[in-house]
Amino acid sequence: MATGLLACTASKQSIVSKNHPPNKVIAHRGAFKNTGFPENSIASLQAAIKLGCGGSGFDIHMTSDEGLVINHDDKFLGLPIETNIYTQLLQKTLPNGEKIPTLENYIKTGMSQHYTKLIAEIKTSVISKERSLQLTQKVVDLVKKLKAEDWVTYISFDYDVCKKIKQLDPGAPVQYLNGDASAEKLKADGLDADYHYSVFEKDKNWIANAKKTGIIVNAWTVNDPEIMDEFLAQGIDLITTNEPELLLKKLKK
């Protein structure tokens, strides 16, 4: 599946859809669990692309000297990201030999193909709301500078960050993560839902109502095959998973 899809879509045109990945599979922090690559590494992104995932997620932080880097936690191998300069983080090395990826390199890697969307999570600052919004501005500015808008979907736990993205780029696809806003509120603010799967397990009508409302629905992080089947049967738009290989197999059936 992956090879053929990548071959037929890898052209000079933009990726299949700016607003929606070409399939339901979002690799959580790249394809890392079954590949052995570090999560959020360039290698895990490349693995998700090779698999033919509709999207690959990653997490963005800002260093003390305003460098934009990719890592899940607010510490990189024990070093706090927000209170260290970028060159200090280069003292540490991921198990596969990579240094901490920069957002620019991550985006450029994603732009080398035309199938897998880049699902960019803007992490909430542990220092201040102001830094979260500053990070948001810098991320959107870089995406625009690289002309990567068609590749990127933004996600965040911070509602103000989501609204800031829409202010900076009204056409950008933005998904809210925290699970506490109704489909109607999200629709009014031009946002979509990327909620923990437990939200949809508790309210069996949530997905159906969201479809009527006209918003995209993603569930994170779904690794249980039975829950995958349940959500697929309900017509969910996207599923974020540590098991992209499993979900891709289900979609082939």
Image (spheres, rainbow, N blue to C red):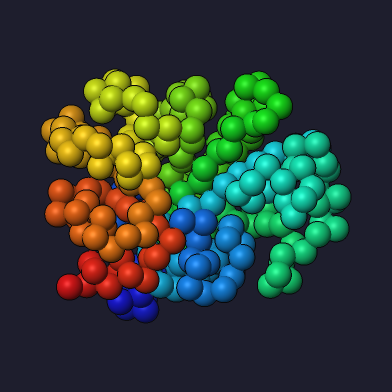
Q: x and y percent of residue 247 in the render?
A: 30, 65
> Is residue 178 left or right of 61 when viewed as pictured?
left
The answer to whether residue 210 is above or below residue 44 is above
Which quadrant: the C terminus? bottom left
The answer to whether residue 110 is above or below residue 140 is below
> Is residue 163 left or right of 199 when viewed as pictured?
right
> Is residue 87 left or right of 141 when viewed as pictured?
right
Residue at x 46%, y 49% (from the top left corner) = 119
Which quadrant: the N terminus? bottom left
The answer to whether residue 11 shows anywhere in this view is no
Q: x and y percent of residue 139 in the render?
A: 59, 38
The answer to whether residue 181 is above or below residue 201 is above
Q: x and y percent of residue 219 in the render?
A: 33, 46
Residue at x 75%, y 43% (from the top left corner) = 81
Toward which corner of the image does residue 63 lie, by quadrant?
Answer: top right
The answer to whether residue 200 shows anywhere in this view is yes
